[in-house]
Amino acid sequence: MREARKDPKRLEHILEAIDNILSYVGNDDMATFVADKIRYHDVVYNIMIIGEAANMLTTEFRETHPSTPWRQITGMRNFLVHDYHQVEKELVWQVIVKDLPDLRSQIVSYLTELIK
């Protein structure tokens, strides 16, 4: 059973993984980023952490924060783990540039809400 008291820590894990990804990518374009296999795999690993931490949040927390696409986040983790051979680098890049900035803002807001 998941405990609500652990939700803030899971959110911190998500935030840390997002910040790791953003620092690994920096201002590089997609071609430069994917050419560096170590950084690419570090990013994929951190996306998996985001998905696993999201999965470990309580159902109550996820249900009270429906604007975050929790199912897609955990689905991405599952895709990266189980279908790793089918992952297109463009998809990973889209997650970085389109999804993570909004997710980061939401996670910061949730942490602020829980710390009150």
Image (cartoon, rainbow, N blue to C red):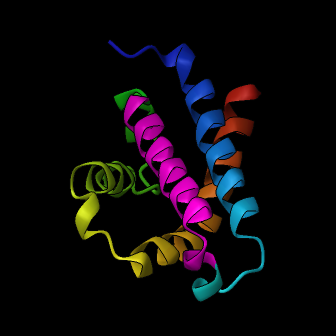
Image position of 107 (left or right of 64): right
At x 41%, y 51%, the residue is: 66
Q: State the residue in front, 3 or 86.
A: 86
**Does 71 appear above or below 10?**
below
Total marks shown come to 0
* Magenta range: 33-56
At x 72%, y 53%, the residue is: 19
Residue 106 image offset from top left, x and y in percent: 62, 54
Residue 27 image offset from top left, x and y in percent: 77, 79
**Does 59 appear above or below 100?**
above
- The picture quadrant where one finds residue 69 is bottom left
Q: State the residue in front, 75 or 35.
A: 35
Quadrant where the N terminus sits is top left
Q: State the residue in front, 105 or 52.
A: 52
Residue 105 image offset from top left, x and y in percent: 68, 58
Residue 99 image offset from top left, x and y in percent: 53, 69
**Does 71 appear above or below 92?**
above
Quadrant where the C terminus sits is top right
At x 62%, y 46%, the residue is: 17
Q: Is residue 7 magenta?
A: no
- The picture quadrant where one finds residue 13 is top right
Image position of 73 (left or right of 7): left
At x 45%, y 13%, the residue is: 3
- The picture quadrant where one finds residue 33 is bottom right
